[in-house]
Image (tube, grey):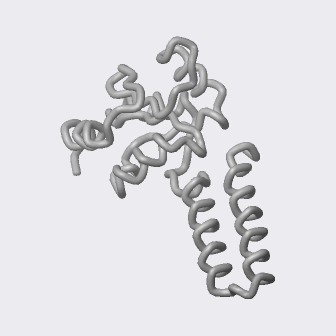
Amino acid sequence: MMRAWILPILLVLSGSAVATGQVFAGNPGTAAALLTAFVVFAGVTSPLVFPRSIGAREAQRRSAVDGRPVVYWRPGCTYCMRLRIRLGRGARRLHWVDIWRDPAGAAVVRAANDGNETVPTVVVAGRPHTNPDPAWVREQLRAGLPH
């Protein structure tokens, strides 16, 4: 769990150090802007922007019942963030599994990607798709699920 927060914490600490330097240099406006940018970037790279993760087994069970895709992801992954942001509110309709928190989820990803933990890996109808185009994932939601 703590591993997911390392990058956001480092960003906030780095932003604080840079902002402090700017304050001492007599640039409080620049300090405020830089600190704000670092905090926003820390928020975007944190697990907070993703829907609540569940375990791989529970996600597979739910997917079998409702037909919704399962997304295997990890915090700090730029491709995962891209998928999450481009899905918008529709992301809540997917089942999300954080592979850093769930060893069974990491095993599913390794099995689908020749032993690599390449994310995002989206499983639709039991078939894995590694780093799919967000538009394709949105289409899978439209095609298989009621709105």
Q: Residue at x 37, y 25 (%)?
A: 129
Q: Residue at x 63, y 66 (%)?
A: 38
The x, y position of residue 98, in whole percent, is 58, 38
Q: Quadrant of residue 123?
A: top left
Seen in the picture, residue 66 relative to 9 is either above or below; the reply is: above
Left or right: 141 in relation to 13: left
Q: Quadrant of residue 10?
A: bottom right
Give the mark count.
0
Q: Quadrant of residue 125?
A: top left
Residue with the most extreme left position: 143
Question: In this orientation, which residue lies closer to the viewer: 145 or 90?
Answer: 90
Seen in the picture, residue 47 relative to 133 is either above or below; the reply is: below
Q: Residue at x 53, y 37 (%)?
A: 73
Q: Residue at x 37, y 21 (%)?
A: 126
Quadrant the N terminus occupies: top right
The x, y position of residue 75, in whole percent, is 60, 44
The x, y position of residue 85, in whole percent, is 40, 53
The x, y position of residue 56, in whole percent, is 55, 30
Residue with the most extreme front position: 25
Left or right: 121 in relation to 69: right
Question: In this orientation, which residue lies closer to the viewer: 56 or 86?
Answer: 86
Seen in the picture, residue 20 relative to 39 is either above or below; the reply is: below
Question: In this orientation, which residue lies closer to the viewer: 132 or 15?
Answer: 15
Seen in the picture, residue 127 relative to 35 is either above or below; the reply is: above
